[in-house]
Image: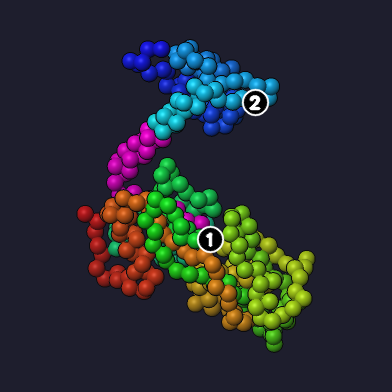
Amino acid sequence: MNTSRLPPLNSLRAFDAVVRHMSFTKAAAELYVTPAALSYQIKQLEEFTGVKLFNRLNRAIELTDQGRLIYPGISQAFEQLLQSMQLLQQKRSGNVLVISAGPAFVAKWLAPRLYRFMALHPHVDARISASLALSNLKVDDVDVAIRFGSGNYPDCCVTKLFDDYMLPLCSPDFLAKIQPVSASDLRCETLIYDDTHMSHNFKIPSWNDWFKSMGVKNFSQKSKGLHFNLADHAIAGAIAGAGILLGRQVLAQNDIDNGRLVMPFEHKIKLDFSYYALCLKGREEEKHIAAFMHWLTAEISGDVDLTTPTPVA
């Protein structure tokens, strides 16, 4: 092997993909090449290094000792290349601020307020990425992420925004129609379920938990219910009078304040998780990130002042 030069880049990419998937077929699909072309690239690398990198088994493959030896360095090299390209993109897009948050939080909390941030910082090009998938701040094109969770986010600068509560909510007309005297009366009505949490690794209080905390026994989830996999859709259903929602207060507060939702009973349950804003450590002093974090905390405390717009230098 000639150690004064590198093997073909495509062969290194092929090797990295095969190790990550431990499958020639899946690696070929990721790289948009045929399995035969991928096998040729691996063969090129093996010929260049002069060693066998994989053992081909009956229906599987495994790394040889030589393959295990070189993989960490190759994997780290591709990671560093990716980070370098992202840093270049961030430098080229100096006024862009990418904010990642869940769709319901964007729709019910962030979007109705973001115009105030833009009024204070008119030169910032804010871009919202609404997704239930958690962004990887090390590799994704995201500057600030807002997450609902435990607050344990390694390698991140974390700012707690607020706690949240589960409480029953319905439209004023729906409440006037059912006129419940006690919490047990709600068992006979159409209950709306927010199932967003079911796709994540955390548990939030259910209707069963709420009824139990109100001293109501023998509640069981019946067919007379309406399930949504997005919280803002569940809130929309409650506003439309489809039933009674056990929803998150943070997401519903604007509709409560504007009279679109009311609480048949004021009892609520505090969640074990909270909302946090985070960015990678070392980036918290970047001007757009710092400005957005400052605005978030001021917005929550009610101290946003729109009379003195602050241009970004």
At 37% from the left and 73% from the top, the residue drawn is: 301
Q: Is residue 223 left or right of residue 227?
A: right
Image position of 270 with respect to 45: above or below: below
Q: Is residue 155 left or right of residue 241?
A: left
Nearer-the-camera pick, 155 or 100: 155
At 29% from the left and 46% from the top, the residue drawn is: 94
Q: Position of residue 275 (x, y in %)?
A: 47, 64
Find numbered disc 1 in the image and state the secondary structure of the residue it sits on: helix
Q: Which quadrant of the figure contains the N terminus?
A: top left
Whether residue 287 appears in magenta in the rendering, the answer is: no
User: Looking at the image, is mark 2 or mark 1 earlier in the sequence?
Assistant: 2
Q: Position of residue 283 (x, y in %)?
A: 32, 51
Q: Quadrant of residue 78?
A: top left
Image position of 82 with respect to 222: above or below: above
Whether residue 83 appears in magenta in the rendering, the answer is: yes
At 44% from the left and 54% from the top, the residue drawn is: 153
Mark seen at residue 136: none
Find numbered disc 2 in the image and state the secondary structure of the residue it sits on: loop
Mark seen at residue 104: 1
At 62% from the left and 75% from the top, the residue drawn is: 168
Residue type marked 2: Ala
Q: Position of residue 133 (x, y in %)?
A: 53, 50
Instruction: Decide if residue 62 is in sight here.
Output: yes
Q: Magenta segment range?
A: 78-102
Q: Residues within 10 Å of mark 1 (few under 14, many from 20)?
A: many
Nearer-the-camera pick, 116 or 52: 52
Q: Which residue is farthest front?
A: 65
Q: Residues within 10 Å of mark 2 (few under 14, many from 20)?
A: few
Q: Position of residue 37 (x, y in %)?
A: 55, 17
Residue type marked 1: Ala
Where is mark 2, residue-wise?
A: 60
